Image (tube, rainbow, N blue to C red):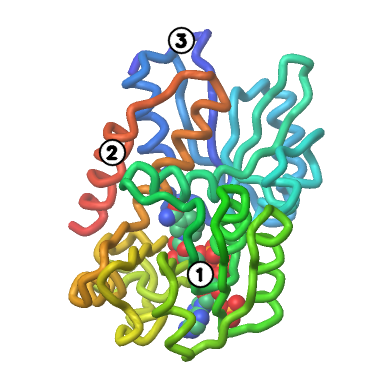
Amino acid sequence: MRLSGATRIAGVIGHPVRHSLSPALHNAAFAQLGLDWVYLAFDVAPHAGARAVEAMRTLDLAGLSVTMPHKETVAAAVDSLDPAAAALRSVNTVVPQPDGSLRGHSTDGAGFVASLHAAGVMVAGRTVCLLGAGAAARSISDALGRSGAAQVTVVNRTMASAEATAALATAAGSTGIVGTVGLLDDIRSADLVVNATSIGMGADGSGGGGVGDLPCDPAALRAGQVVIDVVYHPRETPLLRAARAAGAATVDGLGMLVHQAALQQQLWHGAVPDVSVMTAAAERELAARRQ
Ligand code: NAP
């Protein structure tokens, strides 16, 4: 990489942020596209998200990714929002506009749907059982609604957040309803089962989390279903192993991570990066962490 006075700077703000895979993903994409851009990680204290947005204006940063705990603060600090970011009141991407204003986007849900399409799994007209109602689940529910899912059933430990997450699918065009934790039928009857809880993280002792359980009873999984896990560390979670054993097709969470980043790249400079190059960069980074 050759840096110059003309090098454009993009980056991620978060806290903590040192563990982020985004620098590996985005710098690989810039290199593959032959762009004179560099991507850095900025550890921004929890109270300083809005100041980071002002710094982006001052320093003329070319693009910003936003991760926890700044997504909501940044949604309030930018000048306009895309429809998904407006529905979620959460921003993971900031894009400078030609008039100098900053527009906030949310690419997580669209990245999730793009990763399914890349795996040959269509969403339109399908029934989905969504396990979890946190930040990832909310963006997925909204994106499933926008993509024409027939029905999104949200199953979560905390019922109030399940209802809010199901409402996002309804607002975006699908039918969102709330299922019951432990009720096998909600899971068994779905075409697609999505784990968007943090259960399964670090289940291989990799240090990626510490929760080693399954997010649902594996007896509910069956052949003819597609089971998707948004947890990507480890790539093969206990849920995906159980799904394969039950004869279901599986999609791991690395695709969502890579595709949401590829969408960020397109928003920043318009070029379409090679997702296989970005995936290989993420795999190298994860392998290095296991050593
Ligand atoms: P979050 O906002 O903290 O939500 C966590 C969810 O997991 C909530 O629904 C929570 O239920 C549930 N949960 C956690 N521990 C549980 C337990 N022991 N039993 C039952 N439910 C439990 O987290 P998030 O940001 O949505 O992230 C969730 C996972 O998605 C993480 O593993 C994260 O790494 C992954 N992720 C992946 C991508 C990707 O690109 N692949 C993107 C974003 C996130 P309650 O509501 O009841 O607390």
Residue type for callout 3: Ser
- Position of the N terminus by quadrant: top left
Residue in the foreground of this view, choosing between 183 and 104: 183
Q: Please say if 92 is above or below 154.
A: above
**Cα distance in 3D space between marks 2 and 3:** 24 Å
Q: Which mark is residue 281?
A: 2
Three-letter amino acid code at disc 1?
Leu
**Quarter of image, res 152:** bottom right
Does dot 1 land on a helix, a strand or a loop?
A: strand
Q: Estimate the x, y position of residue 94 in percent, counting from the top left.
A: 65, 34
In the foreground, 1 or 195: 195
Residue 61 in the image, given as x and y percentages of width and height: 62, 24
Instruction: Say whether marks 1 and 3 touch (CB < 8 Å).
Output: no
Residue 102 visible? The answer is: yes
Residue ID at (39%, 44%): 117
Query: What's the residue at 63%, 48% (across, down)?
Result: 44
Name the spot of residue 100 as percent of width and height, x first.
Answer: 77, 19
Residue at the location (36% across, 38% down)? 24
Element at label 2:
helix
Q: CA distance from mark 2 to mark 1?
A: 29 Å
Choose mark 1 or mark 3, whichever is in front.
1
Q: Secondary structure at mark 3?
A: loop
Q: Position of residue 291 (x, y in %)?
A: 18, 57
At label 2, the amino acid type is: Ala
Residue at image point 49% right, 71% down: 129
**Which residue corresponds to mark 1?**
130
Q: Which residue is mark 3?
A: 4
Q: Is residue 79 above or below residue 134?
A: above
Q: Is residue 287 above or below residue 99?
A: below
Mark 3: give few (<14), some (14-19) or many (20+) Cα within 10 Å: few
